[in-house]
Image (cartoon, helix red, strand yellow):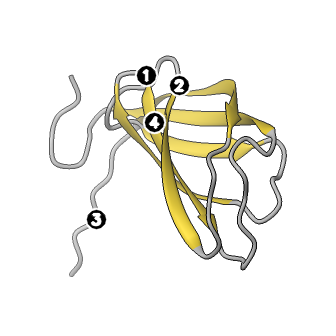
Amino acid sequence: MSNILTSNIINASIVSITLTTPAVGANTVVTQVVTVPGVSAGDTISPEPVALVANLTVTDAVATAANSVTIQYANPTATPVAAGSAPVPFQFIVYKTDAVIGSART
């Protein structure tokens, strides 16, 4: 029998911001910390870029502190991506739940 942890979504919101992407070398993964208003540590985040940047993929996003999200970008190609090659509009879907795995929500 496996352990399945569940919680209830008590609020979902969409926060729109525009980001300047970091430089990402060929076949490399980098992180960027950005300000996302209303986010709390432990929230579940779904980053949705509204526009695409060639050779750049968003692989993960984690709400690390109040109003702070760490985004992980990957460049799986042999061509580097220059910093700020394009301002990218993002929509972050922010899910607040009644519990965070491992601790209670405050």
- Which image quadrant is residue 40 in? top left
Q: Which residue is mark 2?
A: 36
CB contact under 8 Å: marks 1 and 2: yes
Question: Local crowd at mark 4 within 10 Å, few (<14), some, or many (≥20)?
Answer: many
Residue 93 position by quadrant: top right
Q: What secondary structure is found at the residue carrying circle 2?
A: loop
Whether pointer 4 and pointer 2 mark residues with C-beta atoms closer than 8 Å, the reply is: yes
In primary-sequence order, the first of circles 1 and 3 is 3
Instruction: Tell me the residue at 73%/41% (across/down).
Output: 84
Callout 3–callout 2 Cβ contact below 8 Å? no
Disc ID at residue 67: 1
What residue lies at 47% left-to-right and 18% top-to-bottom?
A: 38
Residue 54 versus residue 33 in the image, above or below: below
Between 85 and 1, the residue placed more toward the observer is 85
The residue lying at 61 percent from left, 76 percent from top is: 27
- The image position of residue 95, as x and y in percent, is 49, 35
Q: Secondary structure at mark 3?
A: loop
Residue located 60% across and 65% down the image: 74
Question: Of label 3 and label 2, which has the lower sequence position?
Answer: 3
The nearer-to-camera label among 3 and 2 is 2
Disc 1 and disc 3 in contact, CB within 8 angstroms: no
Kindly report the distance in space between the C-alpha atoms of the residues bearing marks 4 and 2.
Answer: 6 Å
User: Would residue 105 appear left or right of 94 to someone viewing this image?
Assistant: left
Secondary structure of the residue carrying tag 4 is strand
Identity, as a three-letter code, of the amino acid under mark 2: Val
Q: Cα distance, mark 4 to mark 3? A: 26 Å
Q: Amino acid at mark 3?
A: Ile
